[in-house]
Image (cartoon, grey):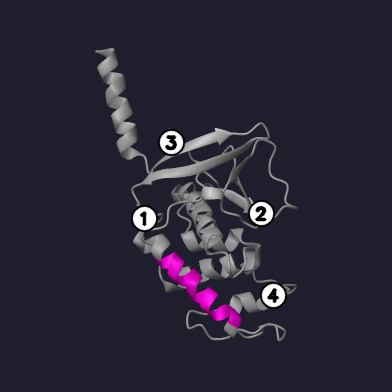
Amino acid sequence: MFLKFIVFLFVLLVSLSDFYVSANDDIDGIVSISVIKSKFDRPIPEEEWDESVKLWVARSCAGEAGFDAVDECIGIAWVYATRWNGLKKSNIKFVDVVRKYSAAIKHKSTHTRRWILNLNLGGKKPVGWPNRLRWENHKDMWNEILFALDEWVDGKRPNPVLGADHFGGSMDKPGKYWVRILPSNGMKFRNRFYRSPYAAPVFID
């Protein structure tokens, strides 16, 4: 009878889990996670997403990872979703998590790349764009970011940094017990992604 109960619990957990993953622990505390299967559930509810929210996430992606980093953008979006899901009880909006977390899109007088805040959905050259750069060389990449985020919110982009709830540059110092998450499938990201002790649990197979 006890064995049947254990089997029932196992089946229930599998049916509720969003991802099935394999993880390999490195002696340096780095975890490499590869997505095996995903139900492709929406990362956030429909009511938390509109064109304005997409624009703020896309601006953050361009500012944090660059225009040519679509896969990393998806990882960043998943970090925001993971953090928001951990804060839902506080009634905070998803877009507020994005804007409070990402230094690249914070309004401040000393902002060195204020043109990031002027990136738009129409693909027009943003006000303040650097003269040394040709906008036409970046426009298509910007549109790719916007398209990728449309796919992401519809559940068509699995998490390449499953379990991560923080990211930052190599100069950032994560907490003592944080674990670094390597991007899946050998992807190369500019930022480093981490899982904090406070992150929501991840089902590991």
In the displayed structure, 56 sits above or below 175; it is below
Residue underneath mark 2: 168
One can see residue 144 in this view: yes
Instruction: Give the Cα distance between marks 2 and 1.
Output: 25 Å
Asked if the residue at tag 4 contacts the one at tag 1, i.e. Cβ–Cβ closer than 8 Å, the answer is: no
- Residue occupying the far front of the picture: 186
Looking at the image, is mark 2 or mark 3 earlier in the sequence?
2
Using residue 62 as the reference point, say whether residue 39 is left or right of it: left
Q: Residues within 10 Å of mark 4 (few under 14, many from 20)?
A: some
Disc number placed over residue 113 in the picture, else none: 4
Looking at the image, is mark 2 or mark 4 earlier in the sequence?
4
Asked if the residue at tag 4 contacts the one at tag 2, i.e. Cβ–Cβ closer than 8 Å, the answer is: no
Asked if the residue at tag 3 contacts the one at tag 4, i.e. Cβ–Cβ closer than 8 Å, the answer is: no
Asked if the residue at tag 3 contacts the one at tag 2, i.e. Cβ–Cβ closer than 8 Å, the answer is: no
Residue 10 x, y percent position in the rendering: 33, 27
One can see residue 97 in this view: no
